[in-house]
Image: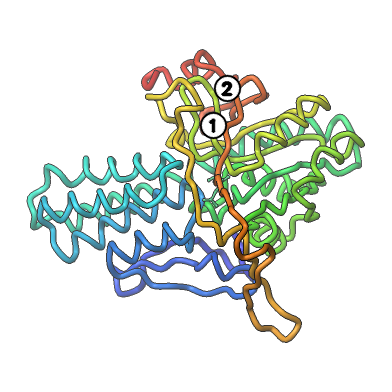
Amino acid sequence: MKVGGEAQRPIWVNPDGWSVGIIDQTRLPHRYEAVTLRTVEEAARAIENMLVRGAPLIGATAAYGVCLAMRMDPSDVALGHACDRLLGTRPTAVNLRWAVEEMLGALYTQPRGQRIEAAYARAAEICEADVEICRSIGVHGLKLIEEAAARKPGEPVNVLTHCNAGWLACVDWGTATAPIYMAHEAGIPVHVWVDETRPRNQGAALTAWELGQHGVPHTLIADNAGGHLMQHGLVDLCLVGTDRTTATGDVANKIGTYLKALAARDNGVPFYVALPSTTIDWTLADGFAIPIEQRGAHELSQITGRTKWGEIVTVSIAPGDTPIRNDAFDVTPARLVTGLITERGIAAASREGLAALFPEKA
Ligand code: MRU
């Protein structure tokens, strides 16, 4: 999508042909800075410290992390160490495991001398496939926005989203945002309620930024405001992403998603989850079996922002000795999900619904 009118992706291979460029998402929206990854350790730290984040982008970064490892040492031992290191970075998004397994599958049978080339080729394919998948999600999800627009001619369709499931979280288009970008480009009036998404504020910092860069009308709201807006008929549709979806349609997404789904159900607002099939964990039937990442206390006790003098500072917002628990994701049961928007179409959030679209996996 666009930054300052120029097409941009959140990950790329630099002109040197091997090092990997990423946008440092911890600096947005205040600074737009590229960072270069040269080793698998740097790739792993970029994932852990959330310079890159969002399920599909974590997978893409891990794929390039394997490339960087192979460049230093294409042995079986190095391949195994690289995969273990990357798999240990973040536990919830299953795209990470998927991408690492794809890389292993592509490299395992290759002779050492061909592993570097094969690794970069497979990582590039993973990225291009993600772009095409997200574009297809956009095409299918666009129909929902078109239907909502037809019910209120001339008025904007109000979509509520949580966290950042935009192009910054993928390779392009985003998942939840793909239908929104397509509606905007088709001239359908669409307006997005952007949940701030405490504690890391991915909505305020990232979703608001990328929608703004692309010219999509949006309004930032406090995390707790969504239910209130729904009660007042101000939300036509909820559209969120997911980090892992079970074979039965339960979805794990950024903490707070479940509360939006509850409010949507209470107010008769459709609640859709957009996902590439790489986010489905076909081995799980129960959302509560999804590992939920526990992150550091500082994410809750501190907040970072820009002062009016342009300085970026971090300040404490809680007593220093307050005990803190920081669950990064929650699980929305399938019964609260109106539908799953995938690259193959919209499925009911159930084993049968997913199996009908992906018979070869089910
Ligand atoms: O902790 P994050 O920022 O990686 O969490 C991201 C989300 O929860 C997204 O909604 C999810 O990964 C879907 S991205 C298309």
Percent x, y for residue 307? 72, 80
Q: Are marks 1 and 2 in contact (CB under 8 Å)?
A: yes
Q: Quadrant of residue 176?
A: top right
**Secondary structure type for disc 1:** strand
Percent x, y for residue 70? 19, 59
Report the side of 94 relative to 39 (left or right). Answer: right
Classify the position of the N terminus by image quarter: bottom right
Q: Hey, which residue is sitting farthest top in the picture?
A: 352
**Secondary structure type for disc 2:** strand
The answer to which of 345 and 85 lies nearer the viewer is: 85
**Amino acid type, mark 2:** Ala
Q: Residue at horizontal 20%, vertical 52%?
A: 118
Q: Quadrant of residue 233?
A: top right
Q: Residue at horizontal 58%, vertical 52%?
A: 324
Distance between the alpha carbons at the discs numbered 1 and 2: 7 Å
Please say if 323 is above or below 141: below
Percent x, y for residue 57? 46, 52
**Amino acid type, mark 1:** Thr
Percent x, y for residue 213? 68, 64
Report the side of 168 relative to 281 (left or right). Answer: right
**Neighbour class for label 1 at 10 Å: few (<14), some, many (≥20)?**
many
Report which residue position mark 2 lands on. 347
Q: Residue at horizontal 65%, vertical 83%?
A: 311
Report the side of 280 relative to 202 (left or right). Answer: left
Mark yes or no: residue 217 visible.
Answer: no
Residue 359's tag is none
Mark found first going from the N terminus, 1 or 2: 1
Report which residue position mark 1 lands on. 342
Q: Quadrant of residue 39?
A: bottom left
Classify the position of the C terminus by image quarter: top left
**Neighbour class for label 2 at 10 Å: few (<14), some, many (≥20)?**
many
Q: How many marks?
A: 2
